[in-house]
Image: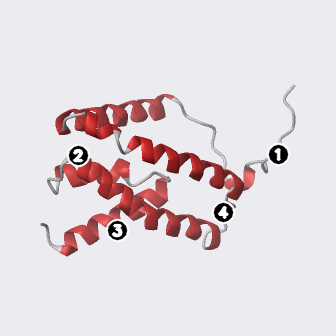
Amino acid sequence: MEPAWAYLLTGLLCGVLSATFGVGSGLILVPILVLAFGFAQQTAQGTSLAVMVPMSLVGALSYRFLAGVPLEFSSTLYLSIGAVVGAIAGSRIPAWFSAPMAQRLFAVLLILIAVRMLLVVLPEASAGDLPKRGSEEPSA
């Protein structure tokens, strides 16, 4: 096992990057745990999910109360219900694959996400520029 400071530093990096870019720790933490700490792919995935709970909660509350960013609480409720059901189902899927195959599938997913983000650039807008949910003008 690595020294505690290595995990603390990694957690700090994941927290900063996750809150800055709004990504789950899995995109950042899973590769670090596998490549730098030698975790098996499935162990890294489970560990990342456990880290995500406190990090996400604190990040969301910080966005709301420290940065003044409005959050969609009704959407959050429905997304959370779906995510919980999906997590129960999804946690069984990695057992179908060998660790190397799971690692390759995760790498392909990261590549697909990166390509999509490179090719599809959304117009720049700040939170204050976005219309409130339900107040959009009908398009002509």
Identify which amino acid the numbered label 2 is placed on. Answer: Gln
Q: How many numbered marks does the figure carry? A: 4
Pointer 4 residue: 69
Tag 1 and tag 3, C-beta contact below 8 Å = no
Image location of residue 61, percent across then percent down: 58, 69
- In the picture, measured across the screen, residue 106 lies left or right of residue 129, that is left
Pointer 3 residue: 12
Mark 2 or mark 4: whose residue is earlier in sequence: 2
- Mark whose residue sits in front, 2 or 4: 2
- In the picture, measured across the screen, residue 100 lies left or right of residue 91, that is left
The CA span between labels 2 and 1 is 41 Å
Tag 2 and tag 4, C-beta contact below 8 Å = no
The local secondary structure at tag 4 comes to loop
User: Residue drawn at (40%, 35%), measured in percent from left and top?
Assistant: 114
- In the picture, measured across the screen, residue 63 lies left or right of residue 108, that is right
Tag 2 and tag 1, C-beta contact below 8 Å = no
Pointer 1 residue: 134
The local secondary structure at tag 3 comes to helix
Image location of residue 94, percent across then percent down: 29, 39
Mark 2 or mark 1: whose residue is earlier in sequence: 2
